[in-house]
Amino acid sequence: MQKVEICGVDTSGLPKLTAKENEELMKKLKAGDKAAREKFIVGNMRLVLSLVKRFRIKNLGADDVFQAGCVGLIKAIDGFDESFGVKFSTYAVPMIVGEIKRYLRDGNSLRVSRSIRDMAYKVLKAREEIEERDEEATIAKIAAALKVAEREVVYALDAISDPVSLYEPVYNKAGDALLLMDQLADEKNTDEIWTEHVALGEAIEKLGEREKRILFLRYFEGKTQTEISEEVGISQAQVSRLEKNALQNIRLNIS
């Protein structure tokens, strides 16, 4: 993930676009300017690169992960609207990360070790022998027959189970399919939460150093305003005022 060239792109030479340049290029590409679109994509590849570095996955090439991130970038460009009232990067981050995660999920096959496979075959054979005696082959009986812990039986069976795709239909009526992924939800890592986190980080960066320090001491280290006043060297009233102003500025910048 540290190499300079990815997908034939010299990452060390990627251009840096200013916020104004991004805005101007976005307007042009939305108007159909293909040259502006190309320049905008290349100018935002650094954003993709910064996100790719979070995913240090063995046996998966950085080229492929970077390409997946670029797909997410292009999708973000196509879906972005200035009326959203947020910076392009704020909108693009969750889409790029989502595309990378989708690639890792679909392209990363699971490899089961030889010892676990051997245990799984023993479990299957023991289950067959128990069922031939017209008995119910429970986990407890299989574990007792093999003289192993029940958790080893469960783990071995899980390891050789075929994975189910999130796009597997679990219900189908008149051509209207309900997929497994439609019934699953991750309330902790939604696109909305990703966007909020990025917007919050950008809002905090706009604060002064003293305000940042006060918020860090107050909300990350859990110190009281009195303790902060002693550490920073200002009165408790000043700490309270700076904290209040900082929170108001954050709310204004992310609203």
Image (cartoon, grey):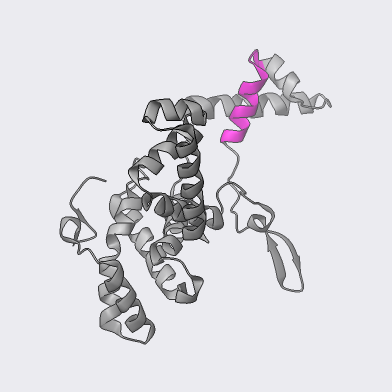
| Residue 129 seen | yes
Residue at the extreme top: 147
Does 54 sit above or below residue 44? above
Does 210 sit above or below residue 118? below
In this rendering, the count of numbered labels is: 0
Residue at the extreme right: 134
Q: Quadrant of residue 67?
A: bottom left
Does residue 251 appear left or right of residue 36 in this picture? right
User: x%, y% of residue 111?
Assistant: 46, 38
* Residue in front for this viewpoint, 245 or 176: 245
Question: Which residue shows up at 64% across the image and 22% down it?
Answer: 151
Q: State which region is magenta.
A: 146-159
* Residue in front for this viewpoint, 255 or 36: 255
Question: Which residue shows up at 35% across the image and 77% down it?
Answer: 26
Q: Quadrant of residue 149?
A: top right
Question: Which residue shows up at 40% across the image and 72% down it?
Answer: 77
| Residue 112 seen | no
User: x%, y% of residue 235?
Assistant: 44, 32
User: x%, y% of residue 73?
Assistant: 38, 65
Does 177 sit above or below residue 137? below
Question: Does the magenta run of residues contain 151?
Answer: yes
Question: Which residue shows up at 78% across the image and 27% down it?
Answer: 132
Question: Does the magenta run of residues contain 232?
Answer: no
Q: Main SS type for the magenta part?
A: helix
Q: Quadrant of residue 139?
A: top right
User: x%, y% of residue 228?
Assistant: 44, 29
